[in-house]
Amino acid sequence: MEQSNTPSARPPRRGIGRELLSWVLVLGGALLAALFLTNFVIISGFVPTGSMQNTINPGDRFIGSRLSYLFDGPERGDIVVFPYPDDESLLYVKRVIGLPGEIVEVKDGYVYINGHQLQEDYIAEQPLQDSGPWTVPEGCYFMMGDNRNHSNDSRAWENPFVHKDKILGKVLFRYWKGFAWLA
């Protein structure tokens, strides 16, 4: 009798243990990938207040990049995520206004950097109170919210500066109530 080289119609049976192991490996790999991404690549969050209106509204969620500042520092106008300097258990989202070595001052409703008025088309309203000046130390940044009269930012903090190594990431886009690119 000749042997046939055609494969049988039935695939070989796998044991239930092997099938479960394959599912555990797939799910474990997905969990490890998600943990890696959220701890080293992306940052996501929720904004509960109106301090960044109209750029980010109350209830909006955002996605940011933890890799944005690996080789360069933040630039003026970047929206960043960082632990609140007076209570690091809270995360804040603010706009970078003052860079290392600069003098920041608010007067007559405008922000001045080293004596020059900052052009800002993103703010909700001009600040009502004069404040400053602050000299931003090396390696640090001065932060402000876009909704200037309703923002708890560097102007009011006991520790008014955010160290570069405390910045967790740059906000790339917001979502939830709408989808809009920020960067």
Image: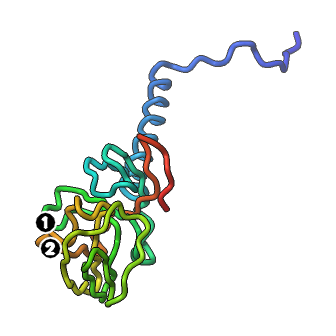
Which residue lies under the disc numbered 1?
86
Q: Residue at x 25, y 73 (%)?
A: 162
Above or below — where is 16 with respect to 1?
below
Tell me whether the residue at label 1 lies in contact with that at label 2, contact meaning CB atoms closer than 8 angstroms: yes
- 111 relative position to 62: left or right: left
Instruction: Using the rendered image of the protein, determine whether residue 122 is visible from the camera's viewpoint.
Output: yes
**Position of residue 90 measured from the top left corner of the image (x, y, whole percent):** 19, 56
Residue for point 30% across, 60% down: 147
Check disc 1 and give the amino acid type.
Asp
Q: Earlier in the sequence, mark 1 or mark 2?
A: 1
What whole-number distance in Å separates the C-alpha atoms at marks 1 and 2? 6 Å
Q: Quadrant of the N terminus?
A: top right
Which residue occupies the foreground of this view, 92 or 44?
Answer: 92
Tell me the quarter of the picture where residue 25 sits: top left
Numbered label attached to residue 159 = 2
Q: Residue furthest left?
A: 158
Please give the label number shown on residue 2: none
Q: Residues within 10 Å of mark 1 (few under 14, many from 20)?
A: few
